[in-house]
Image: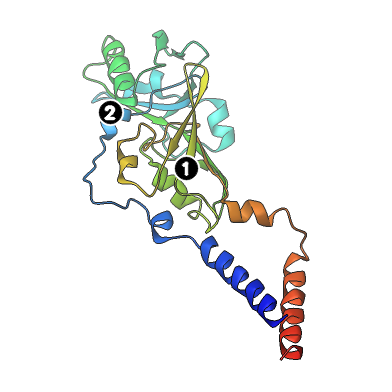
């Protein structure tokens, strides 16, 4: 009887030790290999439904007035961080309707490319204009085993997957770091990518820098999945079982 109890305790200890995560499973960007990433290679492109704040500047401020008038929507919604920036929604075909110019194709362009496109068209009305475009709804979503899951609005388009996880409070101890999923919409189709946070190879991934409306999902590890199968009283029963085993061990001496 005594040997049987010790065997049970030994199995419990072995299972506990084997369930502990190793250093390799928890440390980010491990390994000796050298890896670099190039933001310019993965600059997010303007998409349909993006809301762009566009401001025009020039030596002759009066000449910019037709391009910088705020809409009633901006005034009522409090979007007045830049009093000269008017907002435009990109339609389903990638166009914005711009004052004096009409429809301008910006979908599929980077922010810098769109600025240059508008600058060339506005030059017909203003001498040497300056054009500034900013995303006002650059949003990403982080779900799963993180401390603070939710939606996050980013002030600019340069945000990495590590930045996003940092905003969400980092992964919980139950998050699988070797298989982070990124869901991205491209050309109207949802595509999924899987990356390993524990490897420096993530720096070479096309989703290291996120695009607007990307969804980052952290799956739970086996321990979390297994624990979800038990009732809230599971830990209580474990404690009771431990006490019973201890009592039996004392009696059997």
Q: In the picture shown, does residue 167 fall above or below 17? A: above
Does residue 156 appear in this view?
yes
Q: In the picture shown, does residue 212 fall above or below 25? A: above
Image coordinates for residue 178, horizontal then vertical, percent: 44, 46
For the point 36% across and 31% down, the residue is 206
- Residue 245, quarter of picture: bottom right
Q: What element carries label 1?
A: loop
Classify residue 116 as left or right of residue 50: left
| Crowding at mark 1 (Cα within 10 Å: few <14, some 14-19, many 20+) | some
Q: Which of 10 and 176 is in front in this view?
A: 10
Image coordinates for residue 95, horizontal then vertical, percent: 45, 12
| Crowding at mark 2 (Cα within 10 Å: few <14, some 14-19, many 20+) | few
Image coordinates for residue 159, horizontal then vertical, percent: 38, 40
Q: Nearer the viewer, residue 105 or 12?
A: 12
Identify the image quadrant of the N terminus.
bottom right
Mark closest to the chain's N terminus, 1 or 2: 2
For the point 54% across and 33% down, the residue is 75
Identify the image quadrant of the C terminus.
bottom right
Q: Nearer the viewer, residue 97 or 138?
A: 138
For the point 43% across and 55% down, the residue is 25
Image coordinates for residue 33, horizontal then vertical, percent: 23, 46
Classify residue 79 as left or right of residue 121: right
For the point 55% across and 56% down, the residue is 174
The residue under label 1 is 179
The residue under label 2 is 41
Q: Distance between the residues labelled 1 and 2?
A: 23 Å
Q: What element carries label 2?
A: helix
């Amino acid at each position: 009887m005594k040997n049987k109890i010790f065997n049970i305790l030994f199995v419990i200890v072995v299972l506990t030790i084997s369930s502990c995560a190793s250093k390799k499973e928890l440390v980010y960007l491990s390994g000796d290999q050298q890896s670099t990433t190039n933001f310019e290679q993965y600059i997010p492109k303007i998409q349909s439904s993006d809301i762009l704040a566009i401001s025009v500047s020039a030596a002759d401020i009066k000449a910019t007035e037709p391009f910088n008038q705020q809409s009633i929507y901006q005034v009522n919604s409090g979007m007045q961080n830049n009093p000269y920036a008017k907002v435009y929604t990109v339609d389903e075909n990638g166009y914005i309707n711009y004052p004096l110019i009409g429809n301008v194709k910006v979908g599929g362009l980077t922010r810098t490319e769109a600025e240059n496109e508008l600058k060339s068209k506005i030059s017909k009305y203003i001498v040497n204009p300056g054009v500034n475009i900013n995303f006002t709804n650059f949003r990403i979503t982080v779900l799963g085993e993180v401390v603070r899951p939710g939606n996050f609005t980013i002030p600019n388009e340069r945000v990495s997957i590590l930045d996003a996880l940092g905003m969400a409070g980092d992964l919980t101890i139950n998050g699988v770091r070797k298989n982070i999923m990124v869901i991205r919409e491209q050309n109207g189709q949802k595509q999924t990518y899987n990356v390993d946070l524990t490897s420096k190879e993530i720096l070479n991934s096309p989703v290291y820098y996120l695009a607007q409306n990307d969804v980052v999902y952290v799956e739970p590890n086996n321990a979390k999945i297994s624990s979800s199968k038990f009732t809230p009283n599971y830990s209580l029963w474990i404690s009771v079982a431990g006490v019973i085993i201890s009592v039996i061990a004392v009696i059997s001496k």
